Image (cartoon, rainbow, N blue to C red):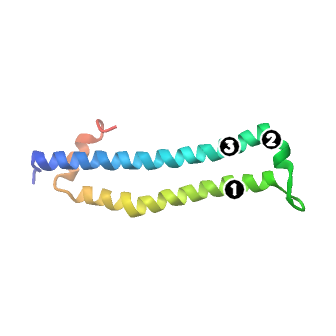
Amino acid sequence: MTPSPTDRAAQLAATRSLARARWRVAAVLTLLMVGVYFGFILLVAYRPALLGGLVSDGLSLGIVLGALVILSAWALTLIYVQWANRVYDPALAALRAMPGAESAARNTQGGAR
């Protein structure tokens, strides 16, 4: 069954909206990770004495903050996966279920970027 022009326009608008939402989420999470990482690197470069301070016997603040950088990467990844499972995947499945989804996907692969 060939979708009507209205159906195709609605599907294209929904696809673009979903792509923008995914891009926004990815950009925010990426910027957060870059901020955490470069914040740590700037501390290493400009405040090494601060990072050398001991939190407890044999454990420096630098080691704790370095571990937190790694944990923040895991946490931000978990946030993205949960968002994708809760929002993105169901929306993508709904788009694929729309009439004419296959032909619309083929038509937008090169031009929707």
Residue under label 3: 39
Find residue 61 and report its horizontal and vertical position in percent: 80, 54
Asked whether the beta carbons under mark 2 and mark 1 sit within 8 Å of each other, the answer is: no
Task: Name the kind of residue labelled 2 in the image.
Answer: Arg
Disc 1 designates what residue? 68
Q: Amino acid at mark 1?
A: Leu
Sequence-first disc among 2 and 3 = 3
- Relative placement, left or right, of 5 versus 96 is left
Per the model, the C-alpha gap separating discs 2 and 3 is 11 Å
- The location of residue 19, given as percent across then percent down, is 35, 46
Dot 1 lies on which element? Answer: helix
Report the quarter where the C terminus lies: top left
Pick the quarter of the image with the N terminus. Answer: bottom left
Q: Which residue is mark 2?
A: 47
In the rendered picture of this protein, how many numbered marks are placed on residues? 3
Q: Secondary structure at mark 2?
A: loop
The quarter holding residue 67 reads bottom right
Residue 36 position, x and y percent, is: 64, 47
Side of 12 relative to 57 (left or right): left
The residue sitting at 11% across, 50% down in the picture is: 3
